[in-house]
Amino acid sequence: MAHITDVLKKPVLTEKSIRLMQDENKYTFDVDVNSNKTEIKQAVEAMFNVKVTSVNTMNIKGKTKRVGRYVGKTNARKKAIVSLAEGNTINLFGEE
């Protein structure tokens, strides 16, 4: 297993992910594309000291972008939605 800071890259903060946080106690993270659900679960439990009940992952394909006549691609990424056990929360905003 890779180090926990290599597995979890950053939290995803969109309207949908914030609604999932508030309503269903699910947290969304960008993760390493080579990590699996077991590694993601262990990394979240170790980093935030919480109990994870399930992990859902999705691979997001890189998009083709164009600037004038130059064509490039954005990086492909992997996103994980982590469900926590009841009573557990992750403080992403630094509030006490």
Image: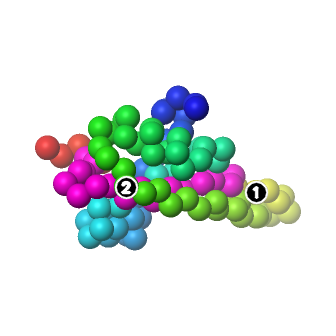
Q: Read off the residue under disc 1.
A: 73
Q: Is residue 54 left or right of residue 38?
A: left
User: Is residue 33 shown to the viewer in this render?
Assistant: yes
Residue density around tag 1, few if under 14, some if 14–19, many if 20 or more, within 10 Å: few
Q: Which residues are magenta?
A: 75-91
Kind of element beneath mark 1: strand
Of labels 1 and 2, earlier in sequence is 2
Q: Is residue 63 left or right of residue 90?
A: right
How far from the left and from the top, in percent, is residue 70? Answer: 84, 58
Viewer-proximal residue, 10 or 65?
A: 10
Image mark count: 2
Viewer-proximal residue, 68 or 54?
A: 54
Q: Nearer the viewer, mark 1 or mark 2?
A: 2
Verify whether residue 23 appears in magenta: no
Q: Is residue 7 left or right of residue 72?
A: left
Image point 82% across, 60% down: which residue?
71
Q: Quadrant of residue 63?
A: bottom right
Q: Vertically, is 8 above or below 86?
A: above
Q: Read off the residue under disc 2.
A: 53
Verify whether residue 90 appears in magenta: yes
Say which amino acid is labelled 1. Answer: Lys
Kind of element beneath mark 2: strand
Looking at the image, which residue sits at the far left? 96
Image point 23% across, 43% down: which residue?
94
How far from the left and from the top, in percent, is residue 25? Answer: 29, 61
How far from the left and from the top, in percent, is residue 36? Answer: 59, 47
Distance Cα–Cα, label 1 vs label 2: 35 Å
Looking at the image, which residue sits at the far right? 69
